[in-house]
Image: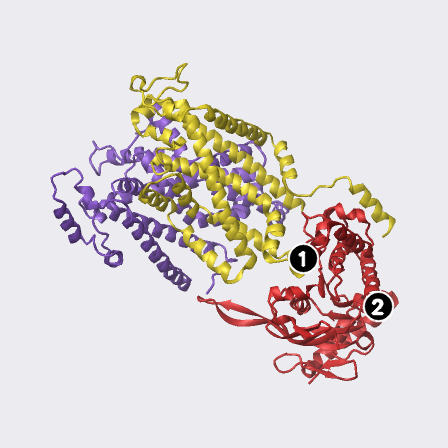
Chain colours: A yellow, B purple, C red
């Protein structure tokens, strides 16, 4: 080795850190003011919702109090009460907690299905790929929302897990497509060929070589997906085909607005929930978009 | 080309077939049947009579026999009857279908009326404050759920400001065919169509902006500029001609998305279309209507994607159709 | 007995088309080539891009599937046909054959430390204690002239030449007998090329390695190889010792390829140009003699003990 090489190596020894990954994404995120603000607000909201709901007594809140129907916001009921005299603020917190948790669970299950099938399809190719892709093509042209509603309305003893299951059946396809196309590109790179010639089994190559290189794309996609899934869940709950009645959602509160009188004159029942969804969606999306830009920049820098 | 379209249409048949079986089985699994449902308020009815009625309607046959009976009628154009409304589904659909189509077309036109100018401005004056506002609007409209946005729009413009009616597709007082009638329809259409359009502009704006920014720096545009062509001509003749055409290819996907959103839009704005009919049919267990509506939406979605692919292949000769 | 014998190897890819995606035709990437590599020898596979030389290398090591033919490996006790093995069965022979890739940037996973990159084959084939593993890695790095501190770094902290040496270290660490080097220096600066090539030569002497050296660069091939096969359109047109090929080329295509080597002596510019024109005229005149009526290349015929040419 010549001396020039040595010099270069010594200079670079200090920054021992992978050129990709979470550190870079984090650096990009804090550079983007709006995204950082959204991130802080989001964390604050989520923490508040979960901690506060921990101290709430759900039975107390869902108890009907006919003496206190449609009370305006006051010191006792910060956001007033609904048609059953139930505290809206408490319902808002519990609904938000449920919507967030279930949105998160759906994101996890759809990601698990989508990533697994996408990576298998892209890595192995051939007839496996052909079958999976034709299956996805079929699901993609289905009128998904309608079929989900039909499913929800036919399940006996309908509960939250049914809802998560039904959603997971239909909302993994675009993720599988994305992961497949990225895996196809990754598979052509020589480090995968090298691992094959070094005798590493396929499942190890997928788990320890290919997937880590897709991690930033997966994180971005999951973030944006979380927002999308909360939107779909609350929307379905609004229509009455989302979470079961025992598990109130933000959409349940908003659905009170189907009554024109509530919509017009008792805005405190539904408007806070609508605005909370709006704020949550915007925050998650701004963070997600910032992550997306960060991940792209990484690719450009190579 | 004709051969390609023919093949694509042929390929739709198995898809529609699988969809029909899936939907048929699903609705068969729905709890309660329309006949029991129809007599639910009638405690005097003898269960034996009910059973006889069911037998007569063929509801006790094995599912595949019921399916074959239903699908062969469907192919002949007989959509069947609604048990709840006691009229043929074709009749039930009639007005609602045209309502949905009118709402969809209005949404589509408004989408392009908003998206194309904004996309061009954002692309042409990249990084200006106008561009930043448009990009911001795009982020927001991508993030906001349709039903929340629709409710807020209805609350503000319908209830608070009272500018537009809060429900229905036409004022029941006016007589059909008069000028008043059409104005009333338009009046009822404005808010739902604008609401849906404001959120469906994302794809077009983003595409147009990126495309114009890309084209701006291509060599043929630089050449045109270097020859002394005016900015106006550079944009109208060179850039827009290249960027605008592919938008047509989004048409199919836009149609599919707008149809999907119509369930929310029609429900919230009380607009009597097929989306609203779908929700009420589910709640009333009117499953012969549910099946037809799902099949119809599936068919329209397939047609939409086919339309997109065909337009794309006409517009962009680089995409060669497999023969 | 040669270490590796390639016998009438064919790699054909189907072209599918039509509604049912039926097979319409084949791309014959490799169309019946035979050669053998002996212990301690460097065999050069030369040709223009797209002639099938890389496909040949990748098929020998099992990255592509062979359509027909044999790749026989002499394991010392038996002859194994590598093309007939499943990926699982192939594992047993991985430590005999290794590969060096063309692009030193994409062939190392950017997320792994050099230590983990080099340890990958060790962890697959040998169960070592962490201390033993570390010693093996340090040894492998030393073989390619890198210090032990390189272990803890990531690939992006190295230059292209250093990365290629890491790739060589990774191939060497399980002591293979044959290394397939697919254009190992063509992605590197000319100044670094010689350095890496000399490393490869030194290592070969020390460990009695065999190389299958795939390249389009005749200068590099002349420097590295004992015997050379010239490939064109998926077939061998000429094979011989380096001397046979460079001093006594017989096939039209070989002559044409050799005439394309740039000569740095400006005084000979006119002469070279005339020579190239002459070969080009000969090429056009005699095409029928070297290709059959379908444009296919003939089978190899011996013209001396070591020298083979594709002629009718």
> What percent of the width, then of the height, locates residue B178?
22, 36
Residue in front for this viewpoint, C136 or A167: C136
Are the residues at dot 2 and dot 1 in contact (C-beta closer than 8 Å)?
no
Instruction: Bin the neighbour count of mark 2 within 10 Å (Cα to Cα): few under 14, some 14-19, many 20 and up.
Output: few
- Residue C165: which quarter of the image? bottom right
Q: Which residue is mark 1?
A: C124
The residue furthest top is: A75
Instruction: Tell me, yes or no, if residue B256 can be seen here.
Output: yes
Q: Is the residue B279 above or below the residue B3 in the image?
A: above
In x, y percent, where is residue C237?
71, 77
- The relative height of residue B88 versus residue C221 in the rendered view (above or below) is above
Q: Quadrant of residue B151?
A: top left
Cα distance in 3D space between marks 2 and 1:
55 Å
Chain hosting mark 1: C
Classify 10 Å Cα crowding around label 1: few (below 14), some (14-19), many (20 and above): some
Q: Is residue B243 left or right of residue C58?
A: left
Picture residue at 78% right of the left edge, 42% below the top: A13
Q: Is residue A72 above or below residue B125?
A: above
Q: Nearer the viewer, residue C281 or C31?
A: C31
Read off the chain for label 2.
C
Q: Is residue A137 left or right of residue B179?
A: right
Q: Are marks 2 and 1 on the same chain?
A: yes
Residue holding disc 2: C269
């Amino acid at each position: 080795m010549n001396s020039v090489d040595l010099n270069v190596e010594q200079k670079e020894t200090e920054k021992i850190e992978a050129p990709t990954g979470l550190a870079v994404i984090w650096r990009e995120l804090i550079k983007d003011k709006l995204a950082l603000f959204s991130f802080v607000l989001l964390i604050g909201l989520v923490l508040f919702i979960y901690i506060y709901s921990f101290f709430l007594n759900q039975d107390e809140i869902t108890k009907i109090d006919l003496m206190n129907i449609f009370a305006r916001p006051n010191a006792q009921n910060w956001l007033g009460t609904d048609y059953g005299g139930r505290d809206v603020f408490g319902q808002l917190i519990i609904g938000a907690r449920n919507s967030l948790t279930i949105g998160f669970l759906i994101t996890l299950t759809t990601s698990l299905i989508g990533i697994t099938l996408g990576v298998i399809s892209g890595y192995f190719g051939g007839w496996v790929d052909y079958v999976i892709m034709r299956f996805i093509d079929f699901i993609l042209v289905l009128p998904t929302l309608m079929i989900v509603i039909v499913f929800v309305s036919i399940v006996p003893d309908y509960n939250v897990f049914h809802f998560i299951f039904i959603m997971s059946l239909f909302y993994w396809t675009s993720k599988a497509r994305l992961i497949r196309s990225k895996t196809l590109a990754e598979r052509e790179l020589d480090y995968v060929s090298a691992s094959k010639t070094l005798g590493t089994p396929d499942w190890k190559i997928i788990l320890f070589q290919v997937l880590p290189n897709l991690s930033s794309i997966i994180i971005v996609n999951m973030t944006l997906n979380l927002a999308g899934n909360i939107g779909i869940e609350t929307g379905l709950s609004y229509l009455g085909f989302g979470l079961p009645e025992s598990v109130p959602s933000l959409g349940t509160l908003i659905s009170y607005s189907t009554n024109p009188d509530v919509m017009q004159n008792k805005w405190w029942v539904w408007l806070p929930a609508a605005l909370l969804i709006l704020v949550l969606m915007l925050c998650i999306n701004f963070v997600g978009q910032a992550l997306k830009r960060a991940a792209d920049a990484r690719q450009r820098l190579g | 080309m004709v051969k390609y379209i023919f093949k694509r249409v042929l390929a739709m048949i198995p898809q529609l077939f699988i969809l029909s079986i899936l939907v048929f089985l699903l609705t068969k699994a729905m709890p309660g049947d329309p006949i029991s449902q129809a007599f639910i308020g009638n405690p005097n009815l003898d269960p034996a009579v009910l059973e006889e009625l069911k037998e007569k309607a063929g509801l006790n046959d094995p599912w595949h026999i019921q399916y074959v009976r239903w699908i062969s009628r469907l192919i002949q154009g007989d959509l069947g009857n609604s048990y709840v409304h006691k009229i043929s589904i074709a009749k039930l659909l009639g007005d609602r279908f045209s309502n949905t189509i009118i709402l969809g077309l209005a949404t589509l036109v408004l989408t392009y009326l908003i998206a194309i100018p904004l996309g061009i401005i954002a692309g042409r004056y990249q990084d200006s404050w106008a561009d930043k506002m448009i990009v911001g609007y795009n982020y927001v409209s991508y993030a906001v759920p349709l039903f929340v946005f629709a409710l807020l729009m209805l609350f503000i413009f319908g209830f608070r400001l009272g500018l537009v009616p809060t429900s229905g597709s036409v004022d029941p007082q006016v007589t059909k065919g008069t000028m008043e009638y059409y104005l009333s329809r338009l009046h009822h259409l404005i808010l739902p169509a604008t609401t849906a359009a404001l959120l469906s502009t994302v794809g077009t704006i983003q595409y147009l902006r990126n495309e114009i920014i890309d084209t701006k720096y291509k060599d043929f545009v630089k050449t045109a500029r270097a020859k002394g062509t005016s900015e106006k001509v550079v944009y109208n003749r060179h850039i827009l001609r290249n960027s605008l055409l592919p938008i047509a290819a989004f048409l199919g996907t836009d149609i599919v998305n707008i149809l999907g959103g119509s369930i929310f839009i029609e429900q919230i704005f009380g607009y009597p279309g097929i989306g609203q009919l779908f929700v009420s049919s589910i709640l009333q267990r009117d499953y012969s209507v549910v099946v037809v509506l799902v099949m119809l939406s599936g068919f329209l979605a397939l047609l939409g994607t086919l339309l997109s692919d065909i337009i794309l292949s006409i517009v962009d000769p680089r995409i060669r159709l497999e023969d | 007995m040669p270490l590796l014998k390639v016998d009438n190897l064919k790699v054909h890819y189907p072209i599918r088309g039509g509604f049912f995606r039926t097979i319409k035709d084949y791309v014959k990437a490799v169309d019946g080539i035979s050669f053998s590599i002996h212990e301690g020898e460097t065999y050069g596979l030369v040709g223009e891009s797209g002639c099938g030389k890389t496909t040949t290398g990748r098929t020998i090591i099992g990255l592509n599937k062979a359509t027909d033919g044999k790749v026989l490996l002499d394991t010392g006790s038996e002859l194994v046909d590598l093309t007939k093995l499943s990926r699982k069965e192939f594992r047993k022979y991985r430590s005999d054959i290794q590969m060096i890739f063309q692009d030193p940037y994409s062939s190392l996973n950017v997320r792994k430390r050099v230590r983990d990159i080099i340890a990958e084959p060790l962890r697959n084939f040998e169960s070592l204690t962490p201390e033993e593993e570390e010693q093996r890695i340090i040894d492998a790095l030393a073989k390619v002239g890198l210090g032990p501190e390189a272990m803890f770094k990531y690939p992006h902290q190295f230059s292209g030449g250093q990365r290629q040496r890491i790739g060589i270290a990774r191939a060497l660490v399980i002591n293979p007998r044959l290394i397939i080097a697919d254009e190992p220096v063509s992605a590197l600066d000319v100044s670094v090329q010689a350095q890496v090539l000399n490393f490869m030569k030194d290592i070969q002497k020390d460990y009695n390695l065999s190389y299958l050296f795939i390249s389009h660069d005749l200068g590099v091939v002349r420097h590295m190889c004992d015997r050379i096969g010239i490939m064109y359109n998926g077939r061998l047109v000429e094979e011989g010792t380096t001397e046979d090929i460079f001093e006594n080329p017989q096939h039209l295509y070989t002559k044409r390829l050799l005439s394309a080597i740039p000569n740095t002596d400006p005084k000979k510019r006119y002469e070279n140009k005339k020579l190239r024109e002459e070969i080009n005229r000969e090429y056009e005149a005699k095409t029928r003699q070297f290709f059959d009526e379908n444009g296919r290349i003939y089978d190899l015929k011996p013209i001396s003990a070591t020298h083979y040419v594709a002629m009718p």
